[in-house]
Image (cartoon, rainbow, N blue to C red):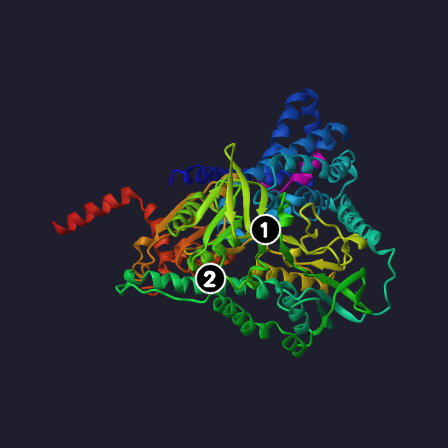
Amino acid sequence: MKKLAPKIAIILCLITSVYLLQHFGFAHELTLDSLKARRAELMSYYELHPFATLVSYFLIYIVSTALSVPGALALSIAAGALFGFWVGLIVVSFASTIGATLAFLVSRYLLRGFIENKFQHKLARINEGVKKEGPFYLFILRLIPIVPFWLVNLAMGLTSLSTGSFFVVSQIAMLPATAAYVNAGTELSQISSLQNILSLRVLIAFVIVGLLPLLSKKLIEHLKTRKFTRRFKRPKSFDYNLVVIGAGSAGLVCSYIASVLKAKVALIEKHRMGGDCLNTGCVPSKAFIRSAKILSYIRRTQEFGLEPMEARFDFAKVMERVQRVIGKVRPHDSIERYTKLGVECIEAKAKIQSPYEIRVGERTITARNIIVATGAEPLVPSIPGLDQIKFLTSDTVWDIRSLPRRLLIFGGGPIGCELAQAFSRFGSQVTIVQTAPHILMREDEDVSTLIENKFKHEGITLLTRHKAKAFGRNNNERWLTCESGGKEIQLEFDEVLFAIGRKANVKGYGLEELGVEVSERGQIVVDEYLRANFPNIYACGDVTGPYQFTHTAAHQAWYATVNALFSPIKKFKVDYRVIPWTTFTDPEVARVGLNEKEAAEKNIPVEVTKFEIEELDRAIAEEEDHGFVKVLTPPGQDTVLGATIVGHHAGDIIPEYIAAMKHGFGLNKILGTIHIYPTLSESNKYAAGNWKKAKVPTKALRILEKFHAWRRA
């Protein structure tokens, strides 16, 4: 209530002020007829009291515009009639801008919090646009008089546009219309109505002037794209509406959507359909992790009241199972399936020769639009001596059939951690080498610490803050020299696996020769519509980022395909507001939105609510009572800004928070939703309950306690 008191006071003052102005006929005085009738009287007063008249006029103008009272036009005309053109222009220009800025600030203070809470995601997208081009669009709106002055003030107050930008842009952009009104006031006797000032012809002229910046921007964009395409001959007709290069997650979704929309589409893949996700990434790693987890359960039998058991396994058979799982999933991504869907699948290497031509084997095909979805490959660092060492990556590890006795893993990110735990459970002596102070550095420290403790308990060696210096080899012995804290240590190993990230596949496709822009990180640079610097070349998935997840690649694929097929008639900005991910360690780490670390880096105030899974009945029953649910909300609000879950099946539990962020419902709605007992998803409800519990007013509870005591008496 204390927070609402100032807002309520301001609202009451505004209502009272408007009422008084109306009651005493202020609006009636701000008409052209009234102004003409009292012109002589006002001129006489101005001659006797010039300074007082200027100050009074200045303040009246500020108040009327700040309160959005009708009559600003008449006041502007009055300035020309009383003060002349130049003095009138200066006074009106600054008074109108100050009044507009006050209205802007009042709107921001009174309404922005409520609107942000109610329409968080819609406003987030608007603010994103305002951040990039807010002053530009404010300039256009100010130049067009048919857009209500007061509406611009109030609407801009709800956005993230800075007060300084609002003031400066408004000051400049309102000058043309202000000059027209003030100039009209210098010839007041000849004006019979406001239509004489702003006739339809004049209004159209203002609209054209207002649209000029926008039209100029579009023209500049067109000239930029023409700069890239004019040296290439455009075919009179095309073989395909769309050619997709790469049959991984992004490329498959692109071609599927295009075929559903009845476009003629070709999908080119030089290696294997399904890309990394099917052949070397998500599918094999999850199959491998599953086998390792079954093995860990057998070793935990006493926890479940069973006699100790010992599992025997053949590692080669485990790896063959991984391949069997890949084979079982493969038909979903096969040439046969996509051909039946209407996609022409071409097994060959593609090279883009022009924005319209792609060389495929011995022939050249043409396409109206091209989507590059060539994915990424494991990043291997340059370390002295590495050329003498045979190493593994997340792509090649699936080829081994013998369990490494000593496995050295570079990288403590999701891939490195997942494989480290799985190999450790099969019996490898696993060591993770990480230059950063923690593993899973994108997560909060309490998350990283929990996983680190779990790894140490399982016998994994963690060498954080260690920098690789050089590899060495002597016959069958291999080692890595590392530096940490000024000291060097040697680590002997049988196999070394690099899992430090992935680099985009941009070489060998003709992109560099064509002039497609590539960032310093080696990814194709795209705009918000996923277009490269050529207007008909798009990119999606790992080749462009910013997130290298299968589900994000599929998400981008929809935007890239629809924009390629329907632009410029209709196009959509790619939406990255709600991007979830899971690290499939045991326990899993699932996250969506902000965590505490990112909130601190971005100076976003948050409240943190936590629920310890050790209190959850289902987790206790399954001997998985570890981890937590952590939710971030704005102070005093239930809007979900982000959630992190560490625990058994965390990736299956987090969708409730993903839906909350996507569709704008908060913790109150989650708390009011029936969750089946006993399930792991109840942890979401209990987290919401902890948030609500912290908001219970203690004074009200004390009153209730006294009320119930009175009723007992």
Q: Residue furthest front?
A: 475
Residue at 23% from the left image edge and 44% from the top image edge: 703
Q: Is residue 72 magenta?
A: yes
Camera-side residue of 560 and 124: 560
Question: Is residue 100 visible to the viewer in this orientation of the structure?
Answer: yes
Task: Name the element at disc 1.
Answer: loop
Write down the quadrant of residue 246 in the picture.
bottom right
- Residue 278: give its label: none
Reply above or below: 194 against 354.
above
Reply above or below: 488 against 140.
above
- Residue 474, given in percent of the width and then of the height, sits at 57, 47
Write down the quadrant of residue 327 in the picture.
bottom right
Q: What range of the chain is rendered magenta?
A: 67-78
Q: Is residue 645 magenta?
A: no
Reply above or below: 659 against 223.
below
Dots 2, 1 in contact, CB < 8 A: no
Judge left or right: residue 392 versus residue 646.
right
- Residue 591, given in percent of the width and then of the height, sits at 48, 53
Q: Residues within 10 Å of mark 2 (few under 14, many from 20)?
A: many
- Residue 220, given in percent of the width and then of the height, sits at 80, 48
- Residue 501: give its label: 1
N-terminal of the pair, mark 2 or mark 1, is 2
Q: Mark 2 and mark 1: span between their CA atoms?
A: 19 Å
Q: Amino acid at mark 1?
A: Gly
Camera-side residue of 228 and 485: 485
Q: Amino acid at mark 2?
A: Ile
- Residue 289: give its label: 2
